[in-house]
Image (cartoon, rainbow, N blue to C red):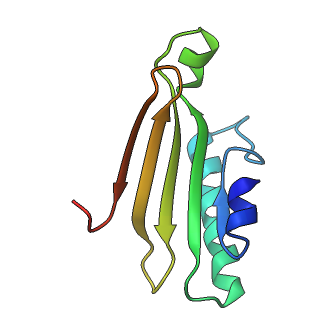
Amino acid sequence: EIILQEFPNDVFLGEEGIDLSGDSSSASSGALKEALGIAEESGMDDRLLFVVDPIDGTTNFQAGLPIYAMSIGVVSLVGSTPEVVAGVIYNPTLGEMTSAVRGRG
């Protein structure tokens, strides 16, 4: 909700709303295509796609192991080829955060 409030013109892709009861690869691929379609339909040329995994390592999280993280990727939808421009991985149990921004080393 916070991302959508701060970036109302951009697209959010998370696990919510994805039917993972069958083939999870197909479901994820379909959700990505839908998100890209939403961006394309808007006609805006400066949109971002936020790809969020709120608990990356669900099995470890459920088992109480501190080897899980929250992951966010940001993809620029400018032009004909989407490009990853930033990413953040945060492990709240260990207090560790790693981030990267395209062009900043």
Q: Quadrant of the C terminus?
A: bottom left
The residue shown at (56%, 89%) is 45
Query: Is 2 rendered above or below residue 47?
Result: above
Query: Is 83 rendered above or below residue 13?
Result: below
The residue shown at (26%, 64%) is 104
| Residue nearer the viewer, 59 or 46 | 46
Instruction: Report whether 10 appears left or right of 77.
Output: right
Q: Residue furthest left?
A: 105
Q: Quadrant of residue 50?
A: bottom right
The residue shown at (69%, 37%) is 22
How many numbered markers are drawn? 0
The residue shown at (58%, 42%) is 53
**Where's residue 69, x and y in %?**
51, 31
| Residue nearer the viewer, 43 or 97 | 97
Query: Is 27 rendered above or below residue 30?
Result: above
Query: Is 80 rendered above or below residue 13?
Result: below
**Where's residue 32, x and y in %?**
60, 60
**Where's residue 92, x and y in %?**
53, 27
| Residue nearer the viewer, 47 or 21 | 47
